[in-house]
Image (cartoon, helix red, strand yellow):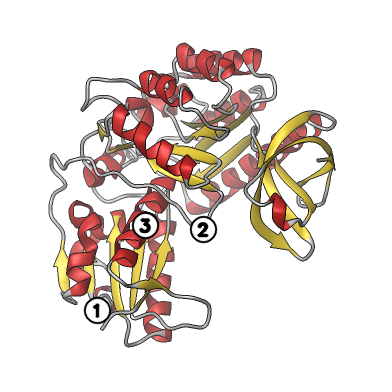
């Protein structure tokens, strides 16, 4: 009889929302989540496969789980399962491999202890709702799934299927429910959230406007949004909203127009420049994070230098740097010019150095400014942490009563970990 389950999640915020929904189904069926020191009867790994690094982390975890808990029923799901099916290098250690189409139906298979592979084409799968809740002060709310783009380096659309989304009216109900549970921050997540509305005849701005009307002291954060879908109207709306925070995560991927074309992206560097200029004009304290891929096939030294120069002159706050990773069946494999692993690593280092400089510049520009911080139940000795609306990590003396509460603060200096110290709260 299955009594306890453990959950491991890799990848995007969408995965975390879906894992939380799966955990909730298990709890309702009487399968509790393991506590420290307990052995699980079943382990669920919800694994990403966006890069080779993600695959490697999944392989290592599978090996670790079967070594530590040899008798546990091991289930692997997510994009990893959809991509590799029976070709996983760890397939002999997995009891049940479940693809994305049946991901939210894991419970019925686990209760029967069904073994094998349940993976089929995602096709025109219906949208399924999910949100994370219980172990965080913020909730990741799934509003959209799938992607209709054909970026040459990416295989996620072939795994996740066509772009689809929930109805605004249903999402508003979920938001009200989460705020009633005490959640203070909701992060809107999906594969391509700016494409919201295709399956319901609505649009992303419609959704933001309706959510802004929800009566709550809580706040909203928009997760990664494609540059070409980050309209001026959305930027203007966030700037005027009392509930949506000035934090933008933009998958730029390259600062070279040549590479953007090779990637089959839907914008150029001029559009990126205009979007960031508008954000900073309307919200000077906004945090802007950018995703960057280095070492893409076809990215020669000239292209990389062009990208680096472009970024050096762009007022962003942080880079999320990824070395290009070969993916099975991606269109980028047809591009002949490869970049060596050594060169990829060197380019990553240069971008990380640039990111650290921009990060420090942004942080130091915020000293003495007033913000609202949401403190989390995460402590380090006598310290506790939280994030401001513009995504600055804040440290203060631990106070249990401050957990999951919003406070107005003035930012002080910074410690060696680039965490802000509050002057007051």
Measure the alpha-carbon separation of dots 1 and 2. Answer: 32 Å
Residue 324 appears in the rendering: no
Q: Nearer the viewer, residue 165 or 172?
A: 172
Specify the quadrant of the image occupied by residue 369: top right
Residue 165 appears in the rendering: yes
Q: Residues within 10 Å of mark 1 (few under 14, many from 20)?
A: few
Q: Residues within 10 Å of mark 2 (few under 14, many from 20)?
A: few
CB atoms of marks 3 and 1 within 8 Å: no
Q: Residue at x 74, y 45 (%)?
A: 394
- The circle on residue 19 is 3
Measure the alpha-carbon separation of dots 3 and 2. Answer: 12 Å
Q: Position of residue 398 (x, y in %)?
A: 77, 57
What number of labels is visible? 3
- The circle on residue 135 is 2
Q: Secondary structure at mark 2?
A: loop
In front: label 3 or label 1: 3
Specify the quadrant of the image occupied by residue 361: top right
Q: Secondary structure at mark 1?
A: helix
Q: Quadrant of the C terminus?
A: top right
- The circle on residue 92 is 1
Q: Residue at x 18, y 68 (%)?
A: 109
Q: Residue at x 58, y 13 (%)?
A: 278
- Residue 391, above or below 261: below
Q: Earlier in the sequence, mark 3 or mark 1?
A: 3
């Amino acid at each position: 009889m299955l009594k306890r389950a453990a959950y491991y999640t890799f990848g995007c915020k969408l995965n975390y929302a879906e894992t939380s929904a799966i955990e909730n189904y298990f709890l309702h069926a009487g399968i509790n989540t393991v506590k420290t020191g307990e052995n699980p009867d079943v382990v669920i790994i919800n694994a990403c496969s966006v890069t080779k690094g993600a695959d490697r982390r999944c392989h290592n975890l599978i090996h670790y789980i079967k070594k530590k808990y040899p008798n546990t029923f091991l289930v692997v799901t997510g994009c990893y399962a959809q991509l590799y099916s029976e070709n996983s290098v760890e397939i002999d250690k997995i009891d049940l491999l479940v693809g994305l189409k049946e991901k939210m139906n894991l419970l019925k298979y686990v209760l029967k202890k069904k073994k094998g592979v349940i993976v089929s084409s995602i096709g025109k799968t219906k949208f399924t709702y999910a949100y994370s809740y219980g172990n965080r002060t913020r909730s990741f709310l799934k509003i959209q799934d799938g992607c209709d783009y054909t970026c040459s380096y990416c295989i996620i659309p072939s795994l996740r299927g066509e772009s689809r989304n929930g109805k605004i009216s249903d999402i508003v109900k979920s938001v009200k429910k989460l705020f009633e549970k005490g959640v203070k921050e909701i992060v809107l997540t999906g594969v391509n959230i700016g494409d919201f509305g295709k399956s319901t005849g609505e649009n992303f701005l419609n959704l933001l406007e309706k959510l802004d009307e929800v009566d709550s002291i809580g706040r909203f954060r928009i997760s990664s949004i494609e540059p070409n879908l980050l309209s001026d109207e959305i930027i203007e709306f966030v700037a005027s909203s009392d509930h949506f925070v000035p934090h933008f995560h933009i998958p730029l991927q390259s600062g070279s127009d040549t590479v953007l074309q090779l990637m089959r992206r839907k914008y150029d560097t001029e559009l990126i420049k205009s979007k960031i200029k508008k954000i900073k004009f309307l919200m000077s304290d906004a945090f802007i994070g950018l995703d960057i891929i280095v070492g893409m096939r076809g990215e020669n030294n000239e292209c990389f230098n062009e990208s680096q120069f472009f970024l050096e002159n762009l007022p962003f706050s942080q880079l999320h740097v990824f070395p290009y990773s070969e993916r099975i069946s991606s269109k980028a494999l047809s591009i002949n010019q490869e970049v060596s692993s050594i060169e990829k690593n060197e380019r990553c280092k240069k971008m990380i150095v640039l990111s650290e400089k921009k990060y420090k510049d942004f942080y130091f520009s915020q000293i003495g400014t007033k913000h609202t911080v949401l403190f989390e139940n995460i402590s380090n000795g006598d310290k506790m942490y939280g994030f401001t609306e513009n995504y600055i990590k804040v440290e203060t003396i631990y106070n249990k009563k401050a957990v999951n509460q919003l406070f107005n603060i003035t930012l002080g200096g910074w410690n060696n970990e680039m965490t802000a110290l509050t002057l007051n709260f």
